[in-house]
Image (tube, helix red, strand yellow):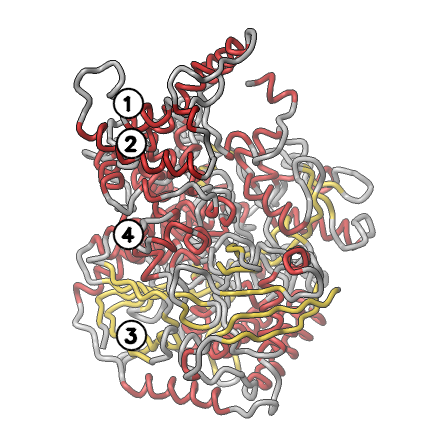
Amino acid sequence: MAEYTLKVRRYQPEAGEGPYWEEFNVELEPSLSVLDGLLQAKDRDDGSLSVRCSCRAAICGSCGMKINGQSGLGCKTQIGEAHEAANRRNGGGNPIVVEPMGNMPVIKDLITDMESTHWEKIRRVTPWLLPHGDPPEREYIVEPESMIDITQSMACIQCGACVSSCLSMEADPDFVGPAALAKAYRFVGDPRDAETKERLHDLAEDPHGIYDCTHCFSCVDACPKGVAPMDQIMRLRRRAGQEGIEDPNSGHHHELAFVKIIEKKGTLDEAELPAESFAFGLKGKLMPSKRAIKELLASVPTVLRAIRVRKVKARQFIPGLHHKLPGGAQDDVKAIYAHAQAHREEFNIYIKGEEGTEPEPDEEEAA
Amino acid sequence: MPTHDVLVIGAGLAGQRAALAAAEQGVSVGLLSKVHPVRSHSNAAQGGINAALNPEDSWESHAFDTVKGSDYLGDQDAIEVMCREAPEEILHLEHLGVTFHRNEEGKLGTRAFGGASAARTYYVADITGQAIMHVLYEQLMKHADSVARYEEWFCTALAIDEQGECCGVVTRNVADGSMELFRAKAVILASGGNGQVWKPTTNALICTGDGISMAYRVGAKLMDMEMIQYHPTTLAGKGFLITEGARGEGAHLLNAKGERFMERYAPNKMELASRDVVSRAEQTEIDEGRGFPDGTVELDITVVPKKRIHEALREIVLVGKDFAGVDITKEPIRIKPGNHYTMGGVKTDVDGRTDIPGLYAAGEVACVSVHGGNRLGANSLLDTLIFGRRSGVDAAARAKQIDGSQPAKEVLEAEQAKIDAIAAREKGSGRRVSEIKLELGTTMDKHVAVFRSEAGIQEALDTVRRLKEEAESAYIDDQGSVFNQDMLGAIELGYMLDNAECTCVSALERKESRGAQYRTDFPERNDEEWLKHIDLQLADDGPDISYSEVTITQWEPEERKY
């Protein structure tokens, strides 16, 4: 048994006051959860302390909250670890800070209005299977891997932790968001769904859709189930690219530009990057598209700012001056590319195990 | 007054399936749940769902395994219905979008499960319940026009009209505390089991036996209430579940001496004997001093190939890591038998009808009975879906035939008065609700668990009756209307105590050992006297006992060996 202090951001809507902080002292094993601590405080000290919870085992998705600023599940965060984290953040002797989830209105204490935020966004992505024609007499025959692939997004328990942590949504509340887009991939990746193309166009053309994500990884950190919503968003983008959908941010071409330049030169030639990224039709063509010219010109202030703050040197933008790798190093780079091409596999925890676990020798052989 | 033809209480698998099935019949449907539907406890079903879908398998084989698993207390007509309709239901779910595991040919693949003579468990990794429930919720979002959802509405009582038929329910809107009377031509209880009556339990905090108690209070019969399943593999302390799928994938059970002790108890099926058998074996090892000092034995999953663990038992990897600090791919994990499932419940026929017209029950709240004395793994999801659907269809048919009556306002007023009385109890005047719950849970786990005796059960019953009195004056802190969970907790405590009392009375009555009921003072099964259901009905001073016959169609009782 150890003693902990939980500092809870409370809000009692009927009290006529704003939110306030209240500290609760609890006593429990360090391996028990922050939710266990909250429930002890509720049981012993104040029954009005409100938190949604049910399974206590990270499967029902009720107890999304922020613990020391980090979005996650109360039941899945060990109180001993939360205590250490609080001390690391603030330098010892500090309480564990518990707040309601972000990006959602607070109803009471740790209870947020998920309906008007999370669920509305889920419904936005047409969250049901859209097969064409009558179902087969037996089951649909599909690649076994395809089911395992989308099981990663099926593992989502709709807890809202990713939504709570999403920085893009903080800037743009209309962003469809990590949970709903992960749900969307569950259908886009499902071979039984017949409206993949329509779904991709819908999500790509929505200005608050798949290109609104800024790769900040917050949702990946927050997700208690390893769904990695950002990865699902990137899969949607890749599928959109394959569908020939034009990326309004030129992000797809920016990515391709990196890949192409490094394959050719081994390191990044900044002089080629803007042209390759924003105006890929420009070089070697007599008639560059209007969009290409417009985007290339639009990138000029960015380039100038980079030079001004000495992120890059002006001479780096002079074509032809970029150095080549010494010796046969460029051949090694090309070999890496060839290997990557030959082993086109996506990271998926249902097949590969958890991130960071070393593959066993027998697994490597099997692969 | 919100009015629907069919009103479903509870939105786990049984409730969602019932609502969708009723809506398909073209009637107006309301689906009411005290939590958001996807928070329901069906989520926790990890391992899978049984169906004899393979050409080499047969529904008869599935039915026989279920009958044997039930220790011959299951009603064979109901079991036949469930097993016959299982394959169709699996295909229906697959067509809706459930991401079932596939074999190499891309067809539905299976895994082995306890008490089954063939590998007939269909699954989605070890999140089968969750995966199915979220797909049904997708369908509810799709059919929002035909099923009205009342998410976070708490049900406090059933309304019965002058003819003795169920005509609605009294509810409290959790969000604002307002009370509302719902009118319906048929009410389907799909509110789950009562695991929270025990502590620890694998069950979620919401599993407080609400529907069982509400039905009991209006005079519906309960059946087999003594049959409470203790699951063989739960974590010590918090009681979290480790799926039977782990043993299905080949994991071993070891005592503290490292012996694979199931050899002594079930030499043929070993770890995959039925749950009551495995739980008793473990408890015997522990009681006789061959367990670990913390009252556990070990589950060794390391014998399962690592890739397979990550693919098929991923949730268990997380549970081990997060809640026990154990990497199950590298070392055994300590487990013990723990409260898991309510085989008994509101007595129904195969269409979910209780003996109160207009009142239906489906899923864990109900007792059809397909599980009898012991439920087989992966039969509970099936039970919820088959009897959820059948209840929905039958309730819709009833609704089309009758006009229904208006529930009396007095029912609502009586419920409001009860709630006002709870709020008015003076702080410090009695015990805290949480204290009573804790004493209830530990008492039941001590005396009405794997091994039971008359003295122990009687002690539990005496405690429960004392707690019932204490609950009358138990006070709460929260005086607000918005999300007053304190108030809901006080109402749930009343439900839990009804459940506990009925279980104790039934367990005392059954003077034999069958399925989950093992009486140390009556260690043998006694078909002569006890091949019958115990039915309970509310009387002035607690439950009145009567008996009903077990339906036997083609499988005569015989000795049960695994």
**Callout 3: SS:** strand
Q: Mark 4 against mark 3, which lies toward the viewer?
A: 4
Which one is nearer the viewer's eye here, B373 or B6?
B6
A241 lies above or below A32: above
Question: Residue B342 vs residue B394: left or right?
Answer: right
Badge 1: chain ID: A
A238 lies above or below B320: above
Q: CA distance from mark 4 to mark 3?
A: 30 Å
Q: Residues within 10 Å of mark 3 (few under 14, many from 20)?
A: many
The answer to whether marks 4 and 3 sit on the same chain is: no
Question: Residue B422 vs residue B525: left or right?
Answer: left
Which one is nearer the viewer's eye here, B268 or A138?
A138
Hey, what amino acid is under mark 4?
Arg
Which one is nearer the viewer's eye here, B414 or A163?
A163
Q: Which mark is residue B168?
A: 3
Q: Which mark is residue A123?
A: 4
Q: Mark 1 against mark 2, which lies toward the viewer?
A: 1
**Callout 2: SS:** helix
Hey, what amino acid is under mark 2?
Ala
Instruction: Residue under label 2, please give it.
Output: A240
Residue B156 image point, x, y percent: 40, 76
Q: Residues within 10 Å of mark 1 (few under 14, many from 20)?
A: many
Query: Of callouts 1 and 2, which one flags the residue occurring earlier in the amino acid sequence?
Result: 2
Badge 2: chain ID: A
